């Protein structure tokens, strides 16, 4: 039937933003109006909700009002993919079908990748960046690394901002300095780089990145040539760093 | 029944206990990693799960040192976990000093950290492989068949824990739970980073504080992490972990 995108400012209420058809828009609005449905559950849990049959018993128990309203409209397969990472929650990608039954495994993977790409675009939009598509795909891929999320937590605590804004700040600094995101994250965690959130309202690409002198703690500055322990599995990035 | 048989039984009961209410996947996998090391007589254990890019993500490790060694696998796309995951079969290397061709970077990192033998065990669910468990040992000798069989049973327990139910799960449920586990790990990393700043501690200590707080207050680790990062909770350190404002 199609797909829709709902976004949230604060990780709470989802507001429908885009839909590929009026039917999809209607269903996203319905979830919004009723305050229940797969999309709300997906953003709450941070995991996809894959309902193969909205007319089934399980869906009726889980979302009584939405399931009956959806079934009345003839929609069966209802799938929701969170747009976000950990505590950073910006929206949900919804997919609806007239037929019951599961999505194929490759369709689920595609939807998860699209949701990651939307996440990067939403982060960059907060800082007024216009990122090209290749870079979005690459960023979506590397944003899953542990060090990036540790750095986002650190920046959130330090600047008293949300994790979403902290991630946006890290992304913007990586973009403006042309340094890979995970390197920025490593520098932040090692205390070698401090990011300033003065321009969190989204008008100044890059924000104020400030190189700080190495701290006195000898553990905090990794010796050159040490493998980055923060890399959490990005085949593309790894393949690029063919080292001796 | 020998003492070790009794201990094995206790651990399986403990692991199945976590399948009921207030289940927390990261807490569960962390505990499993520690119990694996203990029961199998190995030095350390790491657990990796696959994401939707087909990349392995480290979700639990029994020690910080093991975590660093395990990360060299995902960084360099080589190692026993990768092989166990790709082939769906157990992978053994009884002497890592002889593995410089098989896994040059992983073997070097492991040997440098003092690990001389490794065993990779796939986490299988029917025809799907969800990830792999890695066992690191300081002694350069192969694990016995009994130990490997017990390791596979523990890996199966981890798989069941992720799927969160004993019944044969539908693929949708597997995807939902696997993604939930990966997302929980990200949330924990964010909370660790948050605490490193607010408590001026290292990443490991931040995690220890987070876990201690969750246990003392009988709350799920991921719930505590989320409340902390969202500013709904403050934690003031290992000795005085509390959400009361500082005196």
Image (spheres, helix red, strand yellow):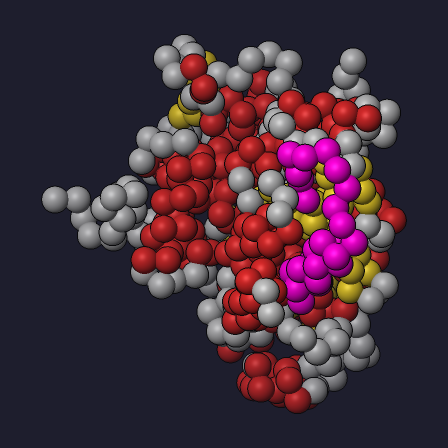
Residue A194 relative to residue B39: left or right: left
Residue situated in front as seen by the camera: A150 or A25: A150
* Percent of width and height locating residue B131: 73, 52
Residue A40 relative to residue B154: left or right: left
Q: What residue is drawn where x is 47% and y is 22%?
A: A190
Residue situated in front as seen by the camera: B160 or A17: B160
Q: Answer whether residue A83 is visible to the viewer in this image.
A: no
* Percent of width and height locating residue B237: 28, 42
Determine the image quadrant of residue A194. Answer: top left
Q: Does the magenta stretch include residue B138?
A: yes
Determine the image quadrant of residue A68. Answer: bottom right
**Above or below, A76 relative to B243:** below
**Above or below, B82 relative to A33:** above
Q: Does the magenta stretch include residue B120?
A: no
Residue B189 relative to residue A3: left or right: left
Q: What residue is drawn where x is 82% and y is 26%?
A: B98
Residue B210 relative to residue B175: left or right: left
Residue situated in front as seen by the camera: A218 or A29: A218
* Percent of width and height locating residue A7: 55, 56
Query: What residue range appears in magenta?
Result: B135-160
């Amino acid at each position: 039937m199609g797909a829709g995108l709902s976004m949230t400012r604060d990780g709470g209420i989802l507001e429908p933003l885009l839909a590929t058809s009026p039917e999809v828009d209607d269903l996203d609005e319905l979830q919004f109006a009723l305050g229940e449905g797969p999309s709300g559950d997906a953003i709450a849990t941070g995991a996809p909700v894959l309902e193969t049959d909205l007319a089934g018993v399980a869906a009726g128990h889980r979302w009584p009002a939405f399931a009956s309203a959806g079934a009345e409209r003839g929609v069966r397969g209802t799938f929701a993919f969170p747009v976000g990472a950990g505590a950073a929650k910006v929206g949900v990608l919804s997919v609806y079908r007239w037929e019951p039954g599961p999505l194929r495994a490759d369709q689920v993977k595609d939807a998860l990748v699209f949701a990651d790409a939307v996440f990067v675009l939403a982060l960059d939009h907060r800082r007024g960046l216009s990122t090209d598509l290749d870079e979005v795909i690459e960023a979506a891929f590397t944003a899953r690394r542990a060090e990036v999320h540790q750095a986002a937590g650190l920046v959130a605590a330090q600047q008293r901002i949300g994790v979403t804004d902290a991630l946006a700040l890290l992304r913007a600094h990586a973009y403006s300095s042309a340094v890979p995101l995970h390197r920025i994250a490593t520098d932040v965690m090692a205390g070698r780089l401090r990011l300033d959130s003065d321009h969190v309202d989204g008008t100044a690409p890059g924000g104020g990145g400030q190189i700080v002198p190495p701290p006195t703690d000898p553990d905090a500055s990794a010796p050159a040539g040490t493998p980055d322990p923060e890399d959490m599995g990005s085949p593309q990035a790894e393949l690029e760093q063919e080292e001796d | 029944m020998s003492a070790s048989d009794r201990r094995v039984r206790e651990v399986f009961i403990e692991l199945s206990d976590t399948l009921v209410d207030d289940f927390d996947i990261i807490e569960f996998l962390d505990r499993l990693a520690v119990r694996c090391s203990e029961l199998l007589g190995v030095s350390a254990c790491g657990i990796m799960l696959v994401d939707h890019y087909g990349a392995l993500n480290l979700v639990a490790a029994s020690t910080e040192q093991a975590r660093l060694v395990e990360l060299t696998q995902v960084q360099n796309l080589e190692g026993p976990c990768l092989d166990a995951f790709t082939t769906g079969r157990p992978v053994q290397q009884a002497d890592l000093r002889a593995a410089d061709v098989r896994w040059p970077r992983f073997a070097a990192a492991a040997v440098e950290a003092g690990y001389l033998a490794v065993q990779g065990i796939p986490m299988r669910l029917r025809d799907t492989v969800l990830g792999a468990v890695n066992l690191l040992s300081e002694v350069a000798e192969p694990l016995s068949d009994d130990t490997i069989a017990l390791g596979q049973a523990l890996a199966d327990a981890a798989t069941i824990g992720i799927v969160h139910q004993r019944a044969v799960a539908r693929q949708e449920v597997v995807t939902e739970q696997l993604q939930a586990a990966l997302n929980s790990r990200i949330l924990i990393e964010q909370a660790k980073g948050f605490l490193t700043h607010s408590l001026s501690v290292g990443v490991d200590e931040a995690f220890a504080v987070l876990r201690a707080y969750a246990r003392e207050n009988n709350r799920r680790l991921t719930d505590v992490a989320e409340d902390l990062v969202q500013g709904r909770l403050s934690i003031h350190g290992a000795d005085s972990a509390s959400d009361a404002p500082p005196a």
